[in-house]
Amino acid sequence: MEKVDILGVEFDYVTQQEILNILHQKIERNKKAFVVTANPEIVMHANKDPQYMNTLHFANHIIADGIGIIIGSKIIRQPLPERVAGFDLMVELLNIANQEGLRVFFLGAKEQTLEQMIPKIKREYPKLVIAGYHHGFFKGHEHTIVQMVKEAKADLVFVALGFPKQEEWIQKNIDSFEKGIFMGIGGSFDILAGTAKRAPVFWRKLNIEWLHRLIQQPSRWRRMLALPIFVKKIFQHKRKNSR
Ligand code: UDP
């Protein structure tokens, strides 16, 4: 598969539909996959932390989640086809799981979030099989959680521990599992549960979903500084390479 290297992170050159088809085929063949949905913050973090960069090298698919990644790919003149929001990819996979009665495991977020989310999943995706779920604050019980996921034999395992924890958890444990698509999806359970809201479609179309997030959670402003620094770094990198 064609990849586009952005500051050392190799993104799949895919549309949402293409990655969905690829993952669907892997599920049908009982293959395993480690999927990362990466935004500029993740790329910047990987550039600061070699261990996290190494974790990302284990991923089978890294998807461009965030308009910043698309802008970055344009700057280096290898434009990625489109943004694939982790949340949207998860919802599409849940739809497939519902149509085909697949087994899904939900790992992460607060216990109250799951208490709100699970009944909603049962209502909205009645034919999907909930293979298991557990909140994301399990320090000291790591082994029990791995055992739980192992016994669940899920086709899809959504890991909502936030980055870098979710990717580190997947890399560390994926060898213990027989099959499954393992995907880190950050705060998506909070959105499914209804405790956090996504930007309205209008904002998303204008590519300012990040602004909506900032307004909802002003404490994120420091994290969002990663975006301008990311763009600057890409320009520096491009200049260095064109010399
Ligand atoms: N979380 C968790 N365990 C932890 C830390 C965080 O389950 O040890 C959850 C948290 O409750 C939230 C999600 O991980 O649901 C992180 O969301 P955030 O929006 O910060 O992640 P991002 O999308 O930026 O990766």
Image: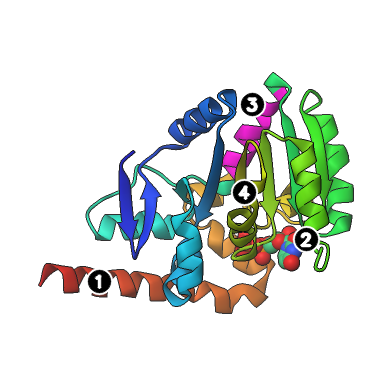
Q: Which quadrant is home to the C terminus?
A: bottom left
Looking at the picture, which amino acid does disc 4 mark?
A: Ile
Residue designated by label 1: 237
Q: Which residues are magenta?
A: 87-98
Callout 3–callout 1 Cβ contact below 8 Å: no
Give the vertical position of 165 relative to 105 (above or below).
below
Would you identify the image quadrant in which residue 149 lies? top right
State ligand 1's quadrant.
Answer: bottom right
State the CA–CA distance, disc 3 to disc 1.
Answer: 40 Å
Q: Is residue 157 magenta?
A: no
Q: Secondary structure at mark 2?
A: helix
Is residue 182 something one can see in this rendering? yes
Q: Earlier in the sequence, mark 2 or mark 1?
A: 2
Callout 4–callout 2 Cβ contact below 8 Å: no
Q: Is residue 92 magenta?
A: yes
State the CA–CA distance, disc 3 to disc 4.
Answer: 22 Å
Is residue 135 something one can see in this rendering? no
Determine whether the beta carbon of the residue marked 1 sits less than 8 angstroms from the nearest atom of ligand 1: no
Residue designated by label 3: 96
From the viewer's side, name the closer residue of 197 and 80: 80
Q: Earlier in the sequence, mark 2 or mark 3?
A: 3
Residue designated by label 4: 174
Looking at the picture, which amino acid does disc 3 mark?
A: Ile
Residue designated by label 2: 142
State the CA–CA distance, disc 2 to disc 1.
Answer: 39 Å
